[in-house]
Image: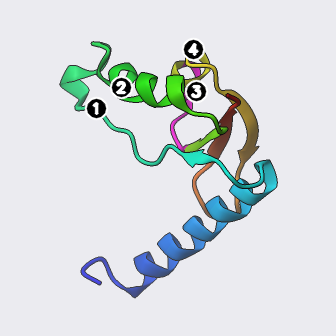
């Protein structure tokens, strides 16, 4: 609420768009890779790969993610993800949905 009611409503609308996009990509069960971040000073040193590689190696289910940063798409593609869709909801950030099959 510190950011105000308008920001809270925009966040709610955006997360609803993310959920709608996810339902269009795949059915249950799946793993959802949610919020992966590395300090900018540490990027490019393998930290993100070290975090997700063990999960990807052992997952018997598809792994799904969204990213709002186009620069992240090639990173995830190197880890076996395919772009499932690009979304640009009115008045909201563009985002990509990606899936990695087991």
What span is in magenta? 67-74
Q: Earlier in the sequence, mark 3 or mark 2?
A: 2
Of badges 3 and 4, the one in the foreground is: 4
Are discs 3 and 2 less than 8 Å apart at CB? no
Q: Residue at x 77, y 54 (%)?
A: 27
**In which quarter of the view is residue 51 placed?**
top left
Decide: marks 2, 1 in contact (CB < 8 A)?
yes
For marks 3 and 4, the one nearer the N-term is 3
Of badges 2 and 1, the one in the foreground is: 2
Disc 3 packing (10 Å; few <14; some 14–19; many ≥20): some
Circle nearer the viewer, 3 or 2: 2
Instruction: Using a 10 Å C-alpha cutoff, classify the residue at mark 4 as few (fewer than 14 neighbours), some (14 to 19) or many (20 or more).
Output: few
**Badge 1: residue crowd in 10 Å (few <14, some 14–19, many ≥20):** few
Q: CA distance from mark 1 to mark 3?
A: 15 Å
Quarter containing the N terminus: bottom left
Residue placed under numbered mark 2 in the picture:
48
Give the number of the disc on residue 73: 3
Q: Mostly what secondary structure, the magenta segment?
A: helix
* Helix, strand or loop under label 3: helix
Distance from the alpha carbon under mark 4 to that under mark 2: 12 Å
The CA distance from mark 2 to mark 1 is 7 Å
The earlier-in-sequence mark between 2 and 1 is 1
In the image, is residue 63 above or below residue 77?
Answer: below
Say what secondary structure mark 4 lies in.
Answer: helix
- Tag 2 or tag 4, which sits nearer the N-term? 2
The label shown at residue 38 is 1
Pick whichever of labels 4 and 1 is earlier in the sequence: 1
- The residue tagged 4 is 78
Q: Position of residue 44 (x, y in %)?
A: 32, 14
Q: Residue at x 75, y 59 (%)?
A: 23
Instruction: Categorize mark 2 by other alpha carbons within 10 Å: few (<14), some (14-19), many (20+).
Output: some
């Amino acid at each position: 609420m510190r950011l105000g009611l308008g920001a809270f409503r925009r966040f709610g609308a955006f997360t609803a768009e993310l959920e709608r996009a996810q339902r269009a990509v795949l059915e249950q069960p799946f793993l959802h890779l949610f919020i992966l971040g590395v300090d900018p000073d540490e990027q490019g040193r393998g930290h993100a790969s070290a975090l997700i590689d063990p999960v990807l190696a052992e997952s018997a289910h598809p792994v799904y993610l969204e990213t709002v940063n186009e620069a992240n798409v090639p990173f995830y593609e190197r880890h076996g993800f395919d772009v499932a869709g690009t979304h640009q909801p009115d008045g909201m950030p563009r985002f990509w949905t990606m899936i990695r099959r087991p």
